C-alpha cells in the first residue's frame, strides 16, 4: 500500500495501433508484388530489393547515429518501406552503385534533412527515383524483358515498356491500332507479363495488396480510387475524342506505375493530406497530371512527377481544407 | 442497421467484467467525508457545524444560486469537523466529516420496496423536489438536474432522451440499474416527462446490453410514448451530442444546448434518483458504483453512500491487488486518476477501475506520421494533430479559430494514435488557455 499510484490524464487505455505495426502491414501488402516480380525478373529483382532495403536502413542508421546523434529508430519500419518502394520503382537490372546513390538521396536528402520520419514534404522513395531517372537516364530506362525466374541480372535482355512503345510510335506517326498490336495484351498486363519497373508490373498483385491495406485499415479508399478514377475518366474522354491518337483507359490504368503509385506511393501518410475531402482533390490532381505528362509531356510516364507535384500542395490543403465539423450545418429530420 | 452517430468514434475492448454481478449494498462505514461540491456550479455552503447530530437524508450543505445543488448527509451520526480535503478529481475543497452512529434516516423517506408509478405533483413541484433532493446528472457530468428540467422561455422540448448507453469500457452501473430497477426507471421517466411536459421519450442503449434492452422494452410496452432504441456499440455514444445525433439525427451546434434542437438528455441513473426523490422523498445520498479491474478478486456493483472512503469499496471488492499501478474514478476513456484511496465516493462517481502497473504506464511518444487517424476518429470533426501542435507552440488564437473549445475530451485521438502521442493532454492545455482568453475578452 505504500506504493505511490500513477496519476495521468485520460484516456487511461490505448488502442493496439503502433507505427511499427502499420509499416509492417504495408510491407505485407507489398509482398504479392515482390513475389510476382521475382517470378518475372528472377535474380535481378532479388538483388535490387535487397540492395535498396539494406542501403536505406544503413543510411538511416548512420545519419541518426553520427550526424543527428539521436536515438536510432530504424526498427519503426519506415526505412524498410521506403527501401522496398524505391526498389519497386527501378528496373531489375540496374547496377548496385546506382541503387545505393538513390537510397542515399531518398533517406539522406528527402527524409533526414527535413527532420526524419513525419517531417518530409516529399515522398522519399520518389525523390530518390526521380533523382536517379534524371542522373542515370540510360540505366533507368532500359527495362529487362520478363523471362521468368531465369532472367539474368546484368546481362538481362532489355526492351521498351508499353508506354514507351506507344509514345515513340505516335511521335513517329504510326497508327495506334498497329502499336497496340506490338504491346502485351490487357490480360498479360494484368498479370505483370510486361517490361517495366520491377514492382509496378503486376496489377493483380498490387490490387491484392490494396485489399489487404483496406482490410487492415492502414489506408482508406479515397486516394487510390480518386487517382485511378480520374485517370480513367480523363483518358476515356481523350480516347472517345480521338481513338486513333489516344490509348484506351484500360491501357492507361494497367501500364506503368499507376497502380503502384495510387496504392502505395500516393497514400504515404506523411506526404498526403489529412482530410478525406483533401485526399480526393489530391488524388484527382495526381491522376490529371499523370495523363497530361503521358499524353503531352516529354516522358512516357508521369506518375512519379505527378505525386511529387501534388505532395507540394499538401501543406496548403491541410491548412485550408477542413473536416466537416460536428453541428456545422443543422440537419433536421 | 442499428442507429449510431456517423462521424468518428472508436471501439475499445469492452471489459464489462461486472455486467453479470447484481448490485449489493455496501455496509455503512465508520466515518464518511462528504464534499460540499459534488456538482457543476457554485459550491454549496455547509449548514451544519462541528458537534451537530445528523440523520441520513438531512441537508448538510445548501446550494447557492440556480446552478448549484444541495448536499445531504448519507449517514446518521455526529459532525466531527468541517475541513479541506483533496477530492477524487484532485482539487482542494471543503468537506463535512461525520462519525457514524447507527443508521437513522429522516422520517419522511419511504424505505419500503413498493413501487409508486403515478404522481399527482405538478411539474413545478417535481422540479422543486429534484432541487431540494440535490439531484445531479449521474452520468459523470454532475450538472444539477432541476436546471435541465426547468422550462426555458422560447425553447420547446420535443423529446426526452434517456441515456442508457454506458459506452465507457468496464463500467456496468447503469446496465445493472436498468436490469434491476427497470420499473422505477420507467416510472421516473414518466415523472420527468410530466415535469418537462413532453409527449415522447426515447431510451438509447448500446447493443452489448441485450438483457437491459429486453427488460426496458418489456416494461415500456405499457406506455406508447416511451420507446427503447438499441444502438451500435461505439464510443463516445454516451456523449450528449452524439446520442442526440444517433437517436433523432439532429446535430447540436457548437456552443448550443440540446434544448436548441428540441431535446433534453438525462442519464438512467439520474432517472432512478429522480424517482426516489419524487416518490420516496429520498434525497441523493447513495448511488451505484462499479468497482472493477482485471486483478480484483471480487469486482462488483454496489449501492454506496456518498462520502464513503474509496478504500472501503476496494476492500469489499477483495482488497487492492499488490500490482495496482493506477486507480481511475470513472471510465478508462474519460475518468480521472486518483491520488489515494482516502478520497470519498461522490455523486458523480459511476465506477472505480484498478489498473495494474503495466497498464498504467504510457507508451513512448514517437513522431507524428500524419496517418490522419486522429482526424478520422474525432466525433466532433476536429483535427487533433493540429490542435496539439498549435497548443505546443502557444498559437492559441489559431487554436481558437480551429475550434479547440468544441473538444469534449473524449480521448478517441489519444486512444487511437499509433505514435502514442499525448494529443488530448495538449488539447486540454490549449482549450483551458483559450477559454481563459475568451473570458478575459468578455470582461473587457
Image (tube, coloured by chain):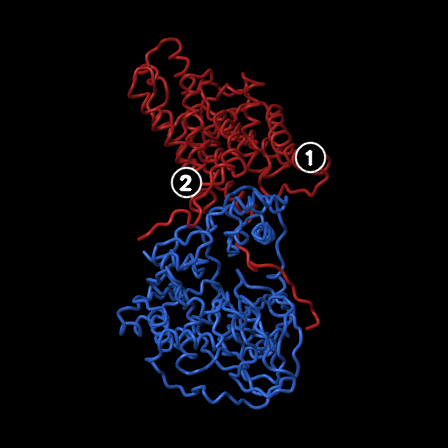
Please tell me which residue lies in front, A261 or B272: B272
Location of residue B167 with respect to B275 vertically, above or below:
above
Q: Is residue A10 left or right of residue B376?
A: right
On the image, numbered disc 1 is attached to which residue? A63
Give the x, y percent position of residue A86.
54, 30
Residue closest to the far top: A172
Which residue shows up at 35% across the image and 54% down it? B249
Which residue shows up at 62% across the image and 70% down it? B87
Q: Colour of chain B?
A: blue
- For label 2, the SS is loop
Location of residue A252 with respect to B138 vertically, above or below:
above
Give the x, y percent position of residue A68.
71, 37
**Image marks 2 and 1: residues in contact by CB distance under 8 Å:** no
- For label 1, the SS is helix
Q: The red chain is which one?
A: A
- Where, by quadrant of the figure, is residue A138 drawn? top right
On the image, numbered disc 2 is attached to which residue? A221
The numbered dot on residue B172 is none
Kindly report which numbered mark, 2 or 1, lies closer to the viewer in this rendering.
2
Location of residue B280 with respect to A30 vertically, above or below:
below
Distance from the alpha carbon under mark 2 to that under mark 1: 35 Å
Which residue shows up at 59% across the image and 83% down it? B29
Q: Is residue B178 left or right of residue B318?
A: left
Residue closest to the far front: B444
Give the x, y percent position of residue B412.
50, 54
- Where, by quadrant of the figure, is residue B164 drawn? bottom left
- Subunit under mark 2: A
Between discs 2 and 1, the one toward the N terminus? 1
Location of residue A181 with respect to B3 vertically, above or below:
above
Amino acid at each position: 500500500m505504500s506504493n505511490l499510484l500513477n496519476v495521468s490524464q485520460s484516456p487511461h487505455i490505448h488502442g493496439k495501433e503502433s507505427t511499427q505495426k502499420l509499416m509492417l502491414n504495408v510491407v505485407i501488402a507489398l509482398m504479392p508484388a515482390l513475389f510476382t516480380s521475382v517470378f518475372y525478373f528472377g535474380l535481378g529483382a532479388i538483388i535490387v530489393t535487397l540492395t535498396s532495403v539494406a542501403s536505406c536502413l544503413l543510411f538511416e542508421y548512420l545519419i541518426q547515429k553520427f550526424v543527428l546523434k539521436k536515438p536510432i529508430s530504424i526498427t519503426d519500419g519506415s526505412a524498410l518501406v521506403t527501401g522496398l518502394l524505391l526498389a519497386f520503382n527501378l528496373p531489375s537490372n540496374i547496377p548496385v552503385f546506382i541503387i545505393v546513390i538513390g537510397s542515399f538521396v531518398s533517406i539522406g536528402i528527402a527524409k533526414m534533412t527535413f527532420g526524419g520520419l513525419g517531417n518530409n514534404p516529399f515522398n522519399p522513395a520518389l525523390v530518390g527515383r526521380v533523382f536517379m531517372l534524371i542522373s542515370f537516364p540510360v540505366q533507368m530506362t532500359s527495362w529487362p524483358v520478363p523471362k521468368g525466374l531465369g532472367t539474368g541480372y546484368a546481362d538481362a535482355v532489355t526492351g521498351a515498356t508499353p508506354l514507351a512503345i506507344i509514345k515513340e510510335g505516335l511521335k513517329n506517326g504510326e497508327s495506334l491500332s498497329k502499336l497496340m498490336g506490338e504491346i502485351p495484351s490487357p490480360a498479360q498486363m494484368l498479370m505483370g507479363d510486361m517490361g517495366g519497373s520491377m514492382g509496378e508490373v503486376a496489377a493483380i498483385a498490387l490490387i491484392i495488396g490494396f485489399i489487404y491495406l483496406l482490410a487492415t485499415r492502414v489506408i482508406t479508399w479515397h486516394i487510390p480510387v480518386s487517382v485511378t478514377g480520374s485517370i480513367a475518366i480523363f483518358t476515356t474522354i481523350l480516347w472517345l475524342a480521338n481513338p486513333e491518337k489516344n490509348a484506351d483507359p484500360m491501357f492507361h490504368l494497367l501500364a506503368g506505375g499507376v497502380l503502384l503509385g495510387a496504392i502505395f506511393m500516393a497514400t504515404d501518410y506523411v506526404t498526403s493530406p489529412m482530410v478525406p475531402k483533401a485526399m480526393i482533390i489530391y488524388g484527382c490532381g495526381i491522376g490529371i497530371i499523370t495523363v497530361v505528362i503521358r499524353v503531352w509531356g516529354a516522358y512516357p510516364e508521369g506518375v512519379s512527377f505527378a505525386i511529387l507535384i501534388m505532395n507540394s500542395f499538401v501543406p496548403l490543403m491541410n491548412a485550408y481544407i477542413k473536416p466537416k465539423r460536428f453541428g456545422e450545418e443543422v440537419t433536421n429530420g | 442497421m442499428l442507429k449510431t452517430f456517423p462521424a468518428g468514434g472508436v471501439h475499445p475492448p469492452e471489459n464489462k467484467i461486472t455486467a453479470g454481478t447484481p448490485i449489493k449494498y455496501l455496509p455503512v462505514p465508520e466515518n464518511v467525508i462528504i464534499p460540499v461540491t459534488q456538482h457543476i456550479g457554485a459550491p454549496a455552503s455547509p449548514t451544519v457545524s462541528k458537534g451537530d447530530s445528523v440523520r441520513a437524508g438531512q441537508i448538510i450543505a445548501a446550494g447557492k444560486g440556480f446552478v448549484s445543488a444541495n448536499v445531504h448527509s448519507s449517514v446518521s451520526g455526529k459532525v466531527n469537523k468541517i475541513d479541506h480535503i483533496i477530492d477524487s478529481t484532485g482539487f482542494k475543497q471543503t468537506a463535512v466529516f461525520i462519525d457514524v452512529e447507527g443508521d437513522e434516516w429522516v422520517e419522511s423517506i419511504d424505505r419500503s420496496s413498493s413501487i409508486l408509478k403515478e404522481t399527482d405533483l405538478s411539474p413545478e413541484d417535481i422540479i422543486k423536489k429534484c432541487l431540494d433532493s440535490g439531484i445531479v446528472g449521474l452520468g459523470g457530468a454532475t450538472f444539477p438536474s432541476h436546471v435541465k428540467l426547468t422550462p426555458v422561455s422560447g425553447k420547446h422540448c420535443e423529446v426526452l432522451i434517456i441515456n442508457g448507453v454506458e459506452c465507457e469500457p468496464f463500467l456496468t452501473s447503469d446496465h445493472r440499474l436498468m436490469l434491476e430497477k427497470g420499473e422505477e426507471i420507467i416510472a421516473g421517466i414518466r415523472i420527468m416527462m410530466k415535469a418537462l411536459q413532453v409527449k415522447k421519450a426515447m431510451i438509447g442503449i448500446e447493443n452489448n446490453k441485450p438483457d437491459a434492452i429486453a427488460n426496458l422494452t418489456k416494461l415500456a410496452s405499457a406506455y406508447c410514448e416511451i420507446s427503447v432504441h438499441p444502438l451500435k456499440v461505439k464510443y463516445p455514444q454516451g456523449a450528449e451530442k452524439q446520442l442526440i445525433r444517433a437517436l433523432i439525427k439532429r446535430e447540436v451546434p457548437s456552443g448550443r444546448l440540446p434544448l436548441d434542437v428540441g431535446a433534453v438528455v438525462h442519464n438512467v441513473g439520474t432517472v432512478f434518483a429522480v424517482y426516489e426523490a419524487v416518490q420516496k422523498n429520498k434525497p441523493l445520498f447513495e448511488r451505484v458504483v462499479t468497482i472493477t479491474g482485471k486483478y480484483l478478486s471480487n469486482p462488483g456493483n454496489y449501492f454506496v453512500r456518498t462520502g464513503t472512503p474509496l478504500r472501503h469499496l476496494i476492500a469489499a471488492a477483495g482488497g487492492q491487488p499488490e500490482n495496482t499501478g493506477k486507480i481511475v474514478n470513472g471510465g478508462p476513456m474519460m475518468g480521472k486518476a486518483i491520488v489515494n484511496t482516502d478520497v470519498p465516493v461522490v455523486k458523480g462517481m459511476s465506477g472505480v477501475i484498478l489498473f495494474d502497473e503495466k497498464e498504467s504506464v504510457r507508451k513512448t511518444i514517437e513522431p507524428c506520421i500524419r496517418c490522419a487517424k486522429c482526424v478520422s476518429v474525432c466525433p466532433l470533426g476536429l483535427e487533433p494533430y493540429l490542435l496539439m501542435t498549435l497548443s505546443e507552440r502557444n498559437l492559441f488564437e489559431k487554436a481558437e479559430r480551429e475550434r479547440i473549445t468544441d473538444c469534449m475530451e473524449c480521448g478517441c485521438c489519444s486512444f487511437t494514435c499509433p505514435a502514442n502521442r499525448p494529443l488530448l493532454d495538449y488539447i486540454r492545455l490549449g482549450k483551458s488557455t483559450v477559454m481563459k482568453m475568451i473570458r478575459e475578452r468578455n470582461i473587457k
